[in-house]
Amino acid sequence: MLDETGIDVDEDRFVQLAEAALASLPPELAGLLDNVVLFVEDDAPAEDPELLGLYDGVALTERDSWYGGVLPDRITIYRRPTLAICATEEDVVEEVRITVVHEIAHHFGIDDDRLHELGYA
């Protein structure tokens, strides 16, 4: 069903799509994730309302001997901004996959410029 902001996908279904995107990572890549959790929130931060996802943490490339006993890094996928740019559930599946991969890449220390080069803008 479409509304004025795009397709309507309820929160539970959107969480399933985000989890499926994470589960679709190749095992050799998924096995390298360290101390990171995935969250879904409805809205992006007020200062960037069109943001689709956010990585908040210390990239693996920046961790050193001081890193320990810290809260997990957070990858947050924002539901409403994602739905606003999608017309079908297939679009949502693809956009969530791209966003999850994009934010995981930040966990591995890959910056936005390189992600743009790779097609994960």
Image: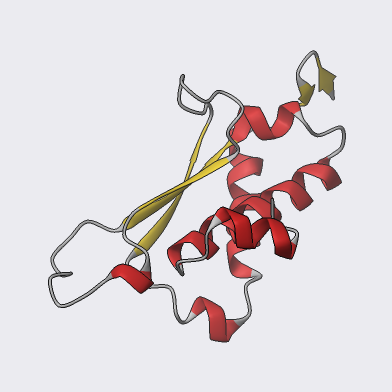
- Rendered position, 27 above or below 73: below
Left/right placement of residue 37 relative to residue 49 reads left
| Whole-percent x, y for residue 38 in the image | 46, 53
Residue that appears at 72% across and 65% down: 118
Q: Dividing the image into 4 quarters, which one contains the N terminus?
A: top right
Residue that appears at 18% across and 69% down: 67
Location of residue 69 by image quarter = bottom left
| Whole-percent x, y for residue 97 in the image | 69, 56
- Rendered position, 40 above or below 49: below
Left/right placement of residue 62 relative to residue 23 reads left
Residue that appears at 58% across and 83% down: 27
Residue that appears at 76% across and 50% down: 93
Q: Is residue 8 visible?
A: no
Left/right placement of residue 113 relative to residue 73 reads right
- Rendered position, 82 above or below 110: above
Query: In the current view of this chain or complex, which residue is farthest to the bottom?
Result: 28
Its colouring scheme is secondary structure
Q: Looking at this view, is 4 or 57 the one in front? A: 57
